[in-house]
Amino acid sequence: MVEEEKLDAIVVGAGPSGTAAAITMAKAGLQVALVEKGTRAGAKNVMGGILYTHYLEQVVGEEWKNAELERPIIEEQRWMMTGQAAISFGYKNFRNREHPHSYSVLRAKFDAWFAAQAEEAGAFLIPETVVEELIVKDDRVVGVRTGREGDLHADVVVVCEGIGLGSRLLEKTLIGGKPLKKPLARNQAAMAVKEIVAMDPATIESRFNCDPGEGASVECYGDATRGLSGFMFIYTNKETLSVGGGALLSEMTDTRLSREELAKRAPNELLNHFKRHPAIKPLLQGGETVEYLAKMIPEGGYHAIPRLYGNGYLVCGDAAMLSNPVHREGSNLAMESGRLAGETVVHAKEKDDFGEAALREYRLRLDRSWIMADMKKYDKAVPLLEHNPQMLGKYPQLLDRALDEFFRVDGVSKWDKQSKILKMFRREGGLKMVRDTIKAAWSMK
Ligand SMILES: Cc1cc2nc3c(=O)[nH]c(=O)nc-3n(C[C@H](O)[C@H](O)[C@H](O)COP(=O)(O)OP(=O)(O)OC[C@H]3O[C@@H](n4cnc5c(N)ncnc54)[C@H](O)[C@@H]3O)c2cc1C
């Protein structure tokens, strides 16, 4: 059907960014193909994950209420861990009962539902089809070549391929002799893994202190990742837990380390280490792992953002390196950038101009949005952790020992305890810890 025809737009990848772009364009009456390599949208997609409904609503309106979501997140827990303790901060927000803004999701279900919305809006979903290359003619992207017979042509190609080993279209495509994106540096991405653990709903609710149907998120730092820059998580779904986490690729593969040390940092080993922790083990007891998934997360910050537009193409979501790991946000940046790209193409269609100057509107809209404001704000967050390993290693241990002393009732007077804690802080770098914490907050002002 589409072999000889020129479409208005081709979207590569039916993740949150691609589907949001496809829905936006299809709703405006454009002819859009949404090409997805999975057997169906979401088949192999990975996310923790917590999805933010505000951005979903921007794309599908009230229909978001029928989305395949798991549990509204009523409680957020953050744990700083050492080998023998967990220092926790919890926030239970009952307002989220009336107007939840964040839900746990399973991408296999959510992406399939979201892609069906794109079809409903009029987009052609083409699953089980790998886009092998972007077709470039006279320094302009004019279509895609897939594993199937016959090229697809369009006025514009919206690249939403995510990141990872299987997502290298932009790196492979040359315009003016230059690739559209540089290969990822190892400190620009985290490697993350996740298990889906089956558990009956009543057990989930009693272990995570939730009311029926409601959910919690637990995110753990420090010893949880063996001190590496990243975090581990447990998110409650309807009948499963999502258990996983990740850390900066450069730290997992640090060539200065011995083979034994590197083995301890392997993603699967980090996950097992986390699951063995005495604060985590009882939460998972009796659960059965039914799925195991791995994927990369962009963590390069504002400076790693590649060129986002050019003659005949736009780039969104993870492929555009739009992600905020400090706030575990990625799917929302993906949906919002997809929506903005879709609106830009609709304007380009009105002007019948898909050249670089017309598509620059996308970059301008991103620059004026919260997306770029957040990308700039957290640009230094990951390098800060990377260059200060004490923040997730030595400092949590120091705090743990101070709290142990404070809470232990052992015949020592409170005056003596106080002076012991102060001495320990002075001797072991407590002042530097305070300075580093202020420096970290200042660098993200
Ligand atoms: C373990 C983990 C936990 C996360 N937790 C959260 C969270 O809690 N909250 C949050 O907001 N974000 C989270 N994220 C980030 C979030 O998953 C991403 O930011 C989001 O999925 C990006 O969407 P995307 O559409 O840009 O890319 P993707 O979701 O990666 O989608 C890309 C799509 O393109 C397809 N594709 C790729 N190449 C081709 C090709 N050549 N041809 C055809 N199809 C192709 C893929 O199959 C896929 O469907 C997490 C990520 C990971 C890995």
Image (spheres, rainbow, N blue to C red):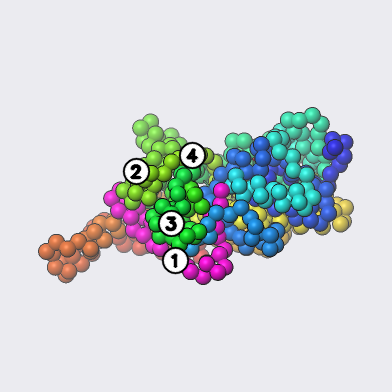
Q: Residues within 10 Å of mark 2 (few under 14, many from 20)?
A: some
Q: Work out whether residue 227 can be spotted.
A: no
Residue depicted at x 66% and y 61%: 57
On the rendered structure, is 226 left or right of 165? left
- Tell me which label, 1 or 4, sits earlier in the chain: 1
Q: Type of residue at label 3?
A: Glu
Task: Return the residue at label 4.
Answer: 290
Q: Residues within 10 Å of mark 1 (few under 14, many from 20)?
A: few
Between marks 4 and 2 in the image, the one whose residue lies nearer the viewer: 4
Q: Earlier in the sequence, mark 4 or mark 3?
A: 3
| Residue in front for this viewpoint, 428 or 346 | 346
Secondary element under disc 1, as helix, strand or loop, is strand
From the top left corner, tell me how far across and down residue 87 is, in percent.
Answer: 34, 58
* Circle 3 residues within 10 Å: few <14, some 14–19, many ≥20: some
Q: Earlier in the sequence, mark 3 or mark 2?
A: 3
Type of residue at label 2?
A: Arg
Using the numbered discs, state the Cα–Cα distance from disc 1 to disc 4 in whole angstroms.
29 Å
- Marks 4 and 3 sit apart, C-alpha to C-alpha, by 20 Å
Residue that carries the numbered disc 1 in the rendered image: 92
Compared with 97, 126 (above or below) is above
Measured as percent of width and height from the top left, residue 419 is found at 19, 66
Q: Residue at x 56, y 52 (%)?
A: 105
Position in image of residue 438 (x %, y %): 41, 64
Q: Which residue is mark 2?
A: 276
Measured in 3D between alpha carbons, the distance from the residue under mark 1 to the one under mark 3, in whole angstroms, is 14 Å
Query: Helix, strand, or loop for circle 2?
Result: helix
**Residue 89 magenta-drawn?**
yes
Residue 125 in sight in this render: yes
Q: Which residue is mark 3?
A: 205
